[in-house]
Amino acid sequence: MNSTIIEGASTTAVEVGSRGGNGQRGEPGGVGKAGGNAGTVSFQQLAPASGSGVQARSTSLVSVYSIGGWGGVGQAGLGRGGSAGGISAVLDASIATQGDNFTGLWVRSEGGQTGNNVPDVVVTSAGPLPFGFSTASLAQPWKSANGGQVNLNTASKYVVSTQGDRAFGIVLESVGGASAAPHGASRRAHRAHRAPDAA
């Protein structure tokens, strides 16, 4: 719950969320550890918020999230990404931003990526630990985690306004984590407009 009036913020001013921990790399010959699940999140914006400033990448004034942890990698297999929790958000105040890439409210539930400790880990049959498999047959697709349900309630009298390129008013998303690709780099979850990374 946020009941503090926010005026003139230059970047994210309200951030509420839950994040699962990343899984560890597997021991020699072992399987990577699963990422932790994120919890459910409830949030209510009770006071008006405004901000101004051009953002280098997609950023929201108010950010609410539940993000599963990434699974680890190992010689005998990959750890699955952690599941994301559901989100219930209530908007009981107006939000306004000015500036490119400056979204008003972003609510996202995102499953963790399977088998990845660093961006674009390459999975090969001959690669050394901790990024390789002992046999090519083990380098197969591994399922990843689900995003959770996202709900937003608001009254029509509350306005979310933005001015600027790629500055969205409200973004709601539930995204499954990327699975692992056989014999190649792990695939990332893809969206046309990526949500801001939570700290």
Image (spheres, rainbow, N blue to C red):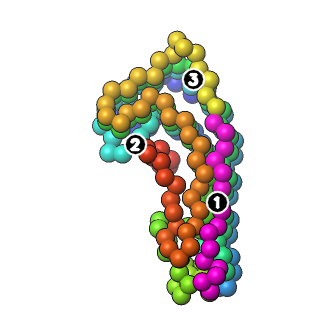
**Residue 108 percent location from the top left of the image:** 56, 41
What are the residue bounds of the magenta stretch? 135-150
**Residue 118 percent location from the top left of the image:** 50, 67
The local secondary structure at tag 3 comes to strand
Q: What amino acid type is highlighted by mark number 1?
A: Ser
Vertical placement of residue 139 versus 97, above or below: below
Q: Residue at x 52, y 12 (%)?
A: 157
Which of disc 1 and disc 2 is earlier in sequence?
Answer: 2
Q: Residue at x 55, y 69 (%)?
A: 181
Mark closer to the observer (1, 3): 1
Q: Residue at x 67, y 39 (%)?
A: 149
Q: Are marks 2 and 1 in contact (CB under 8 Å)?
A: no
The quadrant in which the N terminus is found is top right
The local secondary structure at tag 1 comes to loop
Label 3 crowd bin: few (<14), some (14–19), many (20+), radius 10 Å: many
Q: State the residue position of label 1.
A: 144
Q: Measure how far apart labels 1 and 3 are at the Cα level.
A: 31 Å
* Res 197 visible: yes
**Residue 175 percent location from the top left of the image:** 58, 47
Vertical placement of residue 160 versus 118, above or below: above
Q: Is residue 38 magenta?
A: no
Q: Nearer the viewer, residue 191 or 194?
A: 191
Q: Which mark is residue 58?
A: 2
Label 1 crowd bin: few (<14), some (14–19), many (20+), radius 10 Å: many
Q: Which mark is residue 91?
A: 3
